[in-house]
Image: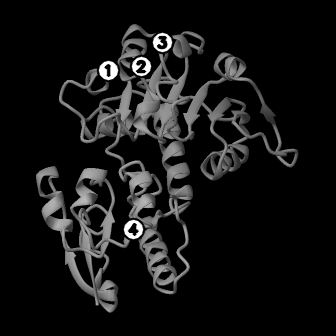
Amino acid sequence: MSKTVILDGYTENPGDLSWDWLKDYGALEVFDRTPRDKIEERIKDADIIITNKTPLTAQSLEKARNVKFIALLSTGYNVVDCAYARSRNIPVCNIPTYSTRAVAQLVFAYISEHYNAVSLHSEDVRGGGWSSCPDFCYQLSPLVEMYKKTLGIIGFGKIGQTVANIAEAYGMNVVAVSGHETNQTHRKNFRWVGLDELLACSDIITLHCPLTPATTGIVNEKFLSKCKRNLLLINTSRGPVVDEKALADALNSGRIAAAAVDVLSTEPPAPDNPLLSAKNCIITPHIAWAGFETRERLMSVLKENFEAYFNGSPINVVN
């Protein structure tokens, strides 16, 4: 019988799901979190490792001579030295496309909050602002319709396309940049454009690109200098695609209007991360994927990955 070790199970399962099905595959050891100095100790006897964000380097895997399978609790797989795993014929399997709708939902939560200022007005009402108002309604900030606004999407995979679907329902214009332009003639008010045109015409830019050498730091001072001053920038992709100091500077100077991010270059962020004190910046703690239904879907794909591996035909292999 094999031994499975989960290194950081808490974020996927804070108690509302179950790992018990893994016991069908042998012994199971679950850790909510694993500090770096405990990784090698915890995986040394494991046949299977499950990890989300706990890194598995070549150095740590060298000490785990029994490992035959690495299962991720994420779509991204940069936390594992996949080349080293491949050299030992260890399949590394991720969880693709489980959070597409949830990420798109958060994008529009950000847009709605920016354009309707729901929290601002609700807090003022609860503080007595409406009770003392001489009129039946009032505005603490301009209220803006999404209709006819231009949404720029950088990265047009499954999430980008789902965002475009929702934007169409709001009557927005959509422009997109992608490394692979597909036929989108079925869409209304949609255009493929170059990056400079997207920056110049977009009222909102939302990032859905993978983290690659080409996209690392793509949102920098030069990028932001080409944008509209009323821009809302959204990042739910990967933190390092944004130069955080450049974005903070653009927000604090009024070069762009606002930003909303669910990911940062380092998570949790250092206290001196410049976005934590930047003006008009919404930051959520990497929660786009964290809804119950989304995590339940992730767990179901993990089950499929285990079944496929033990049947001798691994799926969702990234190495």
Q: Is residue 57 visible?
A: no
Mark 3, Cα crowd under 10 Å, few <14 / some 14-19 / many 20+, is some
Residue type at the position of mark 4: Ala
Mark 1, Cα crowd under 10 Å, few <14 / some 14-19 / many 20+, is many
Distance Cα–Cα, label 2 vs label 3: 7 Å
Verify CB contact (< 8 Å) between mark 1 and mark 2: yes
Q: Closer to the camera, 95 or 64?
A: 64
Q: Nearer the viewer, mark 2 or mark 4?
A: 4
Considering every residue shown, the one lying at the far right of the view is 185
Residue type at the position of mark 3: Glu
Q: Quadrant of residue 5?
A: bottom left
The vertical placement of 3 against 106, above or below, is: below
Nearer the N terminus, badge 1 or badge 3? 3
Give the label on residue 247, or none.
2
Distance Cα–Cα, label 4 vs label 1: 37 Å
Q: Give the percent coordinates (x, y) of residue 6.
A: 26, 69
Q: Measuring 78% from the left and 32% from the top, which residue is drawn there?
A: 192
Q: Which residue is mark 4?
A: 71
Residue type at the position of mark 1: Ala
Q: Closer to the camera, 91 or 277?
A: 91
Q: Which residue is mark 3?
A: 221
Give the label on residue 278, or none.
1
Q: Give the percent coordinates (x, y) of residue 316.
A: 54, 66
